[in-house]
Amino acid sequence: LHPGLVFYTPALMTEGVAGALVACAALVAAGARARGPRLVGAAAIGLVIGVATLVRPQALLAAPAFAVLAFAPFGARRAAVAAAVTLGAALAVCAPWTARNCVRMNRCALVSVNGGWNLLIGTDPAARGTWAPVDVPAECRNVFDEAEKNHCFGQSARRRIASAPGAWLALAPAKLGATFDYAGAGPWYLRAANPAAVSERTKVILGACEVVFERATVAACLAAAIALARRGRAIFA
């Protein structure tokens, strides 16, 4: 029902699949919480998150988070064990692909090798906090192996950051703005793919619908968090 993901569905992108898998993991976590402190539930969460991680590596961060949310009512120790089991199960799902990377790419990577690319883009002031074509550093221009080029980009990015950390940190507001001030990536892709079917006006309208929905979602989450905090204070009082 999320407009951002609905507008993505005509495009062959990973966002819809990754979002659906994370939602499935949340459902499994809710079931594990309802059934009680059984570690088989933690393993089940990890299996779903493992598949999501193969689609989008960032999903791995949700493994311990969902485990803690599911097992926190049963004590901190149980939650910590569940988080370890969940993370282990997720990594086990990814292990065959990781082993393949180590053999075929001559450099181990959990799922993919684009961290160096993104870090380098994140040091470019011209990117204004968003994606931009990579300005290939001179030392990387003759490196053509995929994993080695990513490694070279990462090293170059770290040198840039070390040489001017203040300038790099100053880009943070632009990055936050690019993340939260405008949604509409799905409509943008549809417009770029088929301008005859998706007009500029349609793109703007769909993007506006997505922004309104996401702002309302954030407001609802903040209201729920404030209500829970007040309830907690009342209980302790």
Image (cartoon, rainbow, N blue to C red):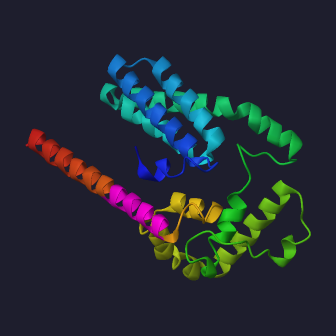
Observer-nearest of 57 and 165: 57
Relative to 136, residue 221 above or below: above
Numbered range of the magenta stretch: 201-215
Relative to 80, residue 13 above or below: below
Observer-nearest of 204 and 46: 204
User: Seen in the image, is 161 located left or right of residue 22?
Assistant: right
Relative to 48, residue 161 above or below: below
Quadrant housing the C terminus: top left
User: Seen in the image, is 130 located left or right of residue 232?
Assistant: right
Quadrant housing the N terminus: top left
Q: Residue 79's x, y, as percent?
A: 41, 30
Farthest residue, direction front: 196
Relative to 92, residue 22 above or below: below
User: Seen in the image, is 209 located left or right of residue 195?
Assistant: left
Q: Is residue 76 magenta?
A: no
Q: Residue at the spot x=67%, y=81% of the render?
A: 163
Residue 152 appears in the picture as rendered: yes
Q: Does the magenta stretch mainly form a helix, a strand or a loop?
A: helix
Residue 77 appears in the picture as rendered: no
Determine the image quadrant of residue 88. top right
Q: Is residue 202 magenta?
A: yes
Farthest residue, direction right: 142
Q: Residue at the spot x=14%, y=43% of the render?
A: 231
For the image shown, how many numbered marks are present on the structure? 0
Q: Residue 141's x, y, as percent?
A: 87, 72
Q: Residue 90's x, y, as percent?
A: 60, 32
Q: Residue at the spot x=57%, y=70% of the render?
A: 130
Q: Residue 227's x, y, as percent?
A: 17, 47
Q: Residue at the spot x=34%, y=32% of the render?
A: 72
